[in-house]
Amino acid sequence: MITEIIVFGRGGQGGVTCAEMIAEAAFLSDFKGVSSFPSFGTERRGAPVEAYTRISSDEIIRTRSQIYEPDIVLVLADTVTDKEQIANIKPDGILVVNTEKEPEKIVEEYDISEDIAVVTCDLTKISLENDLIIDGLPVLNAPILGALSVALKSISLERIKQAIRDHIKGEKGLLNAKVADISSKNSKIRRGRKK
């Protein structure tokens, strides 16, 4: 079975790298198939960015098309998503949002189905507090991966942190892995309820 993931963000927040690190963490977890690629509008800092990842524990992935009905959605910037995009999450999916709000508030605002797990965390605050900043902007890719680990059973936080350290070398990699750990501990979750 293939798990399809969309990362919504803005240029400079690390969305494309986030999608790549998910694929790398899946590979480190012995998944048979991994694929990751971006979709850009205007290529500039601050412009909306979508990045896609497909992972499969048992089959090779050859599809490179955009994802329209994801299993997992990661939202780095809620100003680039709308209700329609969130509504397309498959049953028993996962939604992770960078926000100060409680998961129940996101469920209410976006009319999220009861079977969807919703994770929230103020990733911007965590990045700023830990000096995870490039050109004055908080980098959110590692923190959102830590938040994702709260709901994702198939890839451990340890594999995610290993992928971060492999992808981002040296002291920066260690800092990013540390911030992923912090965000996992500070995330709030409303687990999906079986129908």
Image (cartoon, helix red, strand yellow):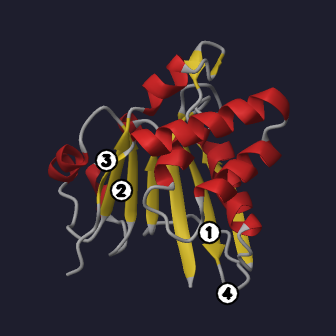
Numbered badge on residue 54: 1
User: Circle 2 is placed at which residue position?
Assistant: 85
Query: Do the CB atoms of the residues marked 1 and 4 lie less than 8 Å apart?
Result: no
Amino acid type, residue under disc 4 in the picture: Asp
Q: Residues within 10 Å of mark 3 (few under 14, many from 20)?
A: few
Q: Helix, strand or loop at disc 4?
A: loop
Q: Measuring 66% from the left and 40% from the top, which residue is drawn there? A: 177
Q: For the residue labelled by badge 3, is the local secondary structure a helix, a strand or a loop?
A: loop
Q: Name the spot of residue 29 as percent of width and height, x first.
A: 71, 69
Q: At 43% from the left edge and 35% from the top edge, which residue is drawn?
A: 77
Q: Residue 58 shows which numbered tag?
A: 4
- Compared across the picture, whether 9 is left or right of 172 comes to left
How far apart marks 2 and 1 lie (CA) works out to 17 Å
Q: Do the residues labelled 3 and 4 touch (CB within 8 Å)?
A: no
Q: Separation of disc 1 and disc 4 at Cα?
A: 12 Å
In the depicted view, which residue is nearer to us: 106 or 150?
Answer: 150
* Quarter assignment of residue 116: bottom left
Dot 4, crowdedness within 10 Å: few (<14), some or many (≥20)? few
Residue 2 sits above or below residue 45 on the image: below
Does residue 36 appear in the picture of this structure? Answer: no
Q: Which of the two discs, 4 and 2, sits closer to the camera? A: 4
Would you say 64 lies left or right of 116 here? right
Residue tagged 3: 82
Name the one closer to the observer, 61 or 163.
163
Q: Distance between the residues labelled 4 and 2?
A: 28 Å
Q: Which of marks 4 and 2 is nearer the N terminus?
A: 4
